Amino acid sequence: MSELVLYVGNKNYSSWSLRPYLALAHTGAPFRTSMIQLDQPDSKANMLAVNPAGRVPVLVDGDLTIWDSLAIGEYLAEKFPAAGLWPRDARVRARARSISAEMHSGFAGVRTSMPMDLRSRKPTPALSDATRGEIARIQAIWRTELAAHGGPFLFGSFSLADAMFAPVTTRFTTYGVALDEVCQAYVQTIAALPAYQQWYADAVAEPWTLG
């Protein structure tokens, strides 16, 4: 079997990179992580060297290169079916894909107002009504799925949906967003994942500060 290499950005800041890292760690397959430092003069060139789109994350599996966090997750779900990265039931799986796609393409206000910064604890910024609506929508998704499937993850056991929402759980922690008891418990569930704890430890150890 060829070596799996996941190229990521700075672990403190790269929300897109955290998602496939959690999914790949969940498979139990051996892999290597290679960090491409962001916001440097050579960042773009280093990304283009591994990905024609010039972005991270990137998964390299032998002669195959996959980019985009959701595409990487889909590939891992097919390559490692025993990991159960998508729910088995077709209807539930469609629901999991729907909310994952919503997270992947939406919530621009949350992303802009509260960039991922794992090391920091900051006051909640002034938020537009639209961004507050996004936060309410995220919590509604969590409450609905946790109630439907019994938790502790959105669809009972860990899935790609959890990987997709993991970065926003860190944003809510960094910026002290008020959450109800159910949603706060979900944030803590993600934070307790061994793979997340390793990522967080690496992020804290990074010497770089961006922005």
Image (spheres, helix red, strand yellow):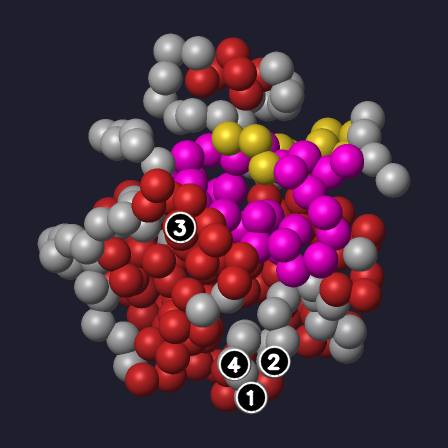
The circle on residue 201 is: 3
Q: Amino acid at mark 1?
A: Gly
The circle on residue 152 is: 4
> Which residue position is annotated with label 2?
156
Q: Marks 3 and 2, Cα distance to the nearest angstrom?
A: 26 Å
Contact, mark 3 vs mark 2 (Cβ under 8 Å): no
Q: Residue at x 81, y 61 (%)?
A: 81
- Is residue 125 toward the left or the right of residue 157 in the image? left
> Which residue position is annotated with label 1?
150
Q: Which residues are magenta?
A: 3-32
Q: Is residue 91 visible in the rendered structure shown here?
A: yes
Q: Amino acid at mark 3?
A: Ala
Q: Residues within 10 Å of mark 3 (few under 14, many from 20)?
A: some
Q: Is residue 183 visible in the rendered structure shown here?
A: no
Q: Is residue 47 above or below residue 32?
A: above
User: 84 or 12: which is nearer to us?
Assistant: 12
